[in-house]
Every structure is written in structure tokens, then in C-alpha cells.
Amino acid sequence: MTIDGQVLATPTGPLSLLTHDGVLVAAGFTADLGEMHTRLPENLRALPLRQVADLGKPARAVHDYLDGDLSALDAVDLEQPGTPTRQRLLTALRAVPAGTTISYAELAERAGLPRTAARAAGSACAQNLIAPFVPCHRILPATGNRPFGGYYYGTSVKEWLLRHEKAI
């Protein structure tokens, strides 16, 4: 049993993908597979990391997404840890279609939580292990002087993704 990883080149920088038994468990804009591996839950971190030349479906989905099939990432099986509330938020987040953005409060509402759960929605986005497959880049603050809000991999990456999806 291993964690298999591949680094893909993208217009906004390297994207590392990690799978376990063919299921995507981490993805992020870094060239360092080890950085992604250390963010995994303890049971997966205990497995050795092996770099491979081609992860198959997740890698093809990234290429298709970059080539303009904005729904390609939606077809990839993935799994990440979290409480039942966090899982509801991640499911609602994954349902936000490409080319659209919503607020943290609206994400909470779509997850069946009160709009006042915007902080929980923000926390789910901040701890998302599988960007851009779980598209936390599509969530924007409702107000404030930072129009893109924060993004684990930097607001320039978030802005590039939104422009690619024609959401801005």
C-alpha cells in the first residue's frame, strides 16, 4: 500500500496530485509531493509516498480542464477527512459549478447550515486538501477590501483559476 503522486505542469504553476488505491486524496499547487503528503490524515501519512509517471484519470482530468472542459475535475473520485458538518460543506462546495462564484454564507446555506455558519464554510475551504477538484477558489467574501479573499496557494492562483473558468 502506497500513496502515489504525480506533479503536473499548469499555466499557474506545478500541481501535485496524490492518490490512494486510485482515489484522489490530495491535490495542490506545489511541486513538492512531500508537502502534500504531510497534510494527509495520519493513517495515510503512514504510507510510503511513491512518485509515478501517470496517475491516469486524475491527471487526464487536469489536462482536460486546462484544455477547456471545465467539468472534467468533477468526474474524479476523491476522499478527504472531516466531521459530518465538514463533509456537508465539502459536498456543497464540489457542487458549485465552474464559471460561478458564491459567498461563504451561501456555501453554508447550500450545505444545509444557517448563513451564520460562514466561518465554518471558510474553515472547510482553508483545510481543503484537494484543490482545485474541490473548488474552494469559487468562494469569495461577500464584502471587504480583498475581493478574492484568501487562498492556500495564493490569490494569484485563485484569480487565474477564476479567469480560466470565466467566472471573473
Image: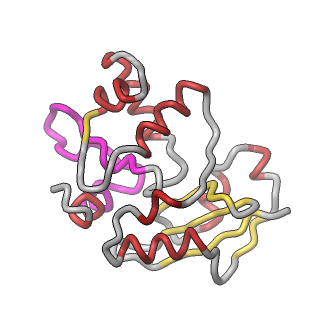
Q: Eyeballing the image, is 108 above or below 166? A: above
The magenta segment is: 135-159
At horizontal 76% and vertical 51% (from top left) the residue drawn is: 44
Quadrant where the image shows the N terminus: bottom right
Quadrant where the image shows the C terminus: bottom left
Front one among 13 and 115: 115
User: Which residue in the rendered view is the most extreme toward the right?
Assistant: 1
User: Which residue in the rendered view is the most extreme toward the bottom?
Assistant: 53
Q: Could you say where residue 94 lies in the image, as x and y percent from the top left? A: 44, 46
Q: Quadrant of residue 9?
A: bottom left
Tally of numbered tags = 0
At horizontal 26% and vertical 62% (from top left) the residue drawn is: 165
Q: Left or right of 64: which side holds 49?
A: right
Q: Eyeballing the image, is 9 above or below 18? A: below
Q: Quadrant of residue 76?
A: bottom right
At horizontal 45% and vertical 32% (from top left) the residue drawn is: 123
Magenta stretch: dominant SS? Answer: loop
Q: Could you say where residue 114 lies in the image, as x and y percent from the top left? A: 36, 16
Q: Eyeballing the image, is 103 above or below 11? A: above
Q: Left or right of 2: which side holds 126?
A: left
Magenta residue check for 6: no
Q: Left or right of 92: which side holds 46?
A: right
Magenta residue check for 142: yes
Front one among 153 and 4: 4
Q: Could you say where residue 86 lies in the image, as x and y percent from the top left? A: 53, 30
The colour scheme applied to this rendered structure is: secondary structure
Q: Could you say where residue 117 lies in the image, as x and y percent from the top left? A: 38, 20
Q: Left or right of 27: which side holds 24?
A: right
At horizontal 46% and vertical 50% (from top left) the residue drawn is: 134
